Image: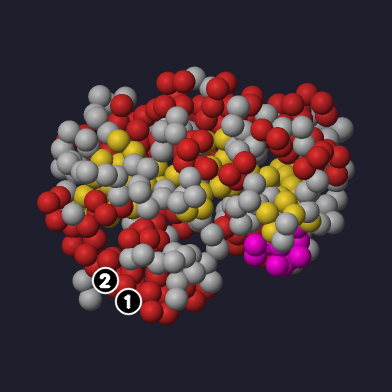
């Protein structure tokens, strides 16, 4: 998940809290889910013991021992936590000399961290839970680089289209629904420069939507312009989008896995697409840092604890994300798994059409941002 996506989601959560639509507990959980903290002393700092010798560099909200109980039990306390607001900040801080043992980037950024020379290969034979990680994750760019493992996947999710099956008639599930003029003015999309441009590139038939050729840009813009004409509004506040679906003002929108549970809790029929073009999927997790100041054996104990089904169930119950250990699906509440649209996890991950988010060249990223803003403005 990119940093702009996390920030946009956080802005919506703040508005919900200010308007009284969510209580403090859910507000804090929501901010934690997108990596935004409140600057308070972490739980880890309060519980820190002398024996642990590990520094974990992560998003706010993940600095909680509930996600690595096995490590805490074995070492008598939590690791030392260090918090970053986004992965670019973390990368630059490490380049400038900051030292940690384990860090928590997403796969779309690991290639840059590797190029910067700040991470080292992971010996997966030292991770008891590694064999249970989804096989489809192990060869994703960023997890594997030049035949070696540099990233241990932990949390993941999908970006797709949610639609009202009682109000939408489609022969097959496709991102093309966003271009269907029958539903003009009844659809929405997340106001984000990553999702809509990549979905547009997929619909434009780009060979690789994360590495466009020069002749593909005009095609992407044409698709994006047609999509924009059908959009009632771009959402930054998920509550606004959910209310639109519930009332029937909207019949389809771009969304994430949690939309299924959210709508089901309101008795609103909803389907979360597995588009024929392949679903968009993000993965975040752990990297082993070069020149870490702590005990490397503890780094492996920590990563293995995060891969446990205990950690996975806690992750799903608290943050509504998927877990990289496939056994977590059987250990978790079946209703929760279905409610978060992870009941189709195996087939989506193994589907060769699935689009795992990849790093984009700076030039492409900047051009697509400018294109998206231009199209939204109707220029």
> What residue did someone put label 1 on?
218
Q: Is residue 117 magenta?
A: yes
The picture places residue 174, in percent across and down from the top left corner, at: 30, 49
Quick check: marks 2 and 1 in contact, CB under 8 Å? yes
Residue interval drawn in magenta: 111-119
Residue 257 visible to the viewer: yes
The numbered disc on residue 222 is 2
Q: Is residue 56 left or right of residue 29?
A: right
Most extreme residue toward the left, as rendered? 182
Check disc 1: other Cα within 10 Å, few if <14, some if 14-19, many if 20+: few
Residue at position x 46%, y 27% from top?
337
Q: CA distance from mark 2 to mark 1?
A: 6 Å
Q: Quadrant of residue 219?
A: bottom left
Please state which of residues 174 and 11 is positioned toward the viewer in this rendering.
Answer: 174
Q: Residue at x 24, y 61 (%)?
A: 227
Q: Position of residue 267 (x, y in %)?
A: 25, 24
Apparent side of residue 361 relative to residue 264 in the rendered image (left or right) = right
Q: SS class of the residue under badge 1?
A: helix
The quarter of the picture where the C terminus appears is bottom left
Q: What label sits on residue 96 in the rendered view?
A: none
Residue 316 appears at what percent x and percent y? Answer: 52, 30
Above or below, comparing residue 315 to residue 203 in the picture = above
Residue at position x 70%, y 35% from top? Answer: 131
- State which quadrant residue 336 falls in: top left
Magenta span contains residue 118? yes
Please count the marks in the image.
2
Q: From the viewer's perspective, is residue 245 above or below residue 159?
A: above
Residue 51 screen position, x and y as percent: 87, 32
Please tell me whether mark 2 sits on a helix, a strand or a loop. helix
């Amino acid at each position: 998940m990119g940093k702009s996506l996390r920030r946009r989601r956080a802005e919506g959560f703040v508005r919900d809290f200010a308007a009284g639509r969510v209580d403090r507990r859910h507000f804090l959980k929501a901010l934690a889910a997108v990596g935004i903290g409140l600057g308070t002393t972490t739980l880890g700092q309060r519980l820190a013991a002398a024996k642990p010798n590990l520094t974990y560099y992560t998003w706010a909200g993940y600095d909680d021992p509930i996600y690595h109980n096995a490590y805490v039990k074995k070492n008598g306390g939590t690791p030392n936590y260090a918090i970053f607001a986004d992965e670019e900040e973390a990368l630059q801080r490490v380049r400038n000399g900051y030292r940690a043992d384990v860090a928590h980037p997403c796969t779309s950024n690991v290639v840059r961290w590797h190029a910067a020379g700040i991470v080292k290969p992971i010996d997966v034979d030292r991770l008891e839970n590694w064999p249970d990680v989804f096989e489809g994750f192990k060869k994703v760019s960023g997890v594997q680089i030049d035949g070696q493992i540099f990233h241990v996947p932990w949390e993941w999710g999908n970006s797709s289209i949610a639609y009202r099956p009682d109000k939408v008639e489609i022969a097959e599930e496709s991102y093309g629904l966003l271009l269907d003029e029958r539903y003009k003015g009844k659809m929405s999309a997340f106001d984000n420069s990553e999702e809509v441009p990549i979905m547009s590139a997929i619909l434009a038939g780009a060979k690789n939507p994360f590495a466009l050729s020069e002749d593909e840009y005009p095609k992407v813009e044409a698709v994006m312009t047609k999509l924009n004409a059908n959009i009632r509004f771009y959402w930054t506040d998920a509550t606004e989008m959910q209310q639109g679906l519930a009332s029937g003002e909207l019949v389809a929108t771009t969304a994430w896995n949690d939309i299924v549970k959210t709508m089901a809790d309101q008795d609103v029929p909803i389907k979360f697409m597995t588009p024929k073009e392949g679903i968009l999927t993000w993965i975040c997790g752990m990297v082993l840092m070069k020149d870490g100041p702590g005990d490397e054996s503890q780094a492996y104990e920590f990563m293995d604890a995060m891969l446990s089904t205990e950690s996975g169930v806690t992750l799903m119950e608290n943050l509504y994300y998927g877990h990289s250990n496939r056994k977590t699906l059987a250990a978790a509440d079946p209703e929760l798994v279905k409610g978060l649209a992870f009941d189709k996890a195996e087939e989506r991950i193994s589907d060769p059409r699935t689009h795992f988010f990849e790093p984009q060249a700076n030039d492409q990223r900047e051009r697509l941002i400018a294109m998206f803003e231009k199209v939204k403005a109707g220029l």
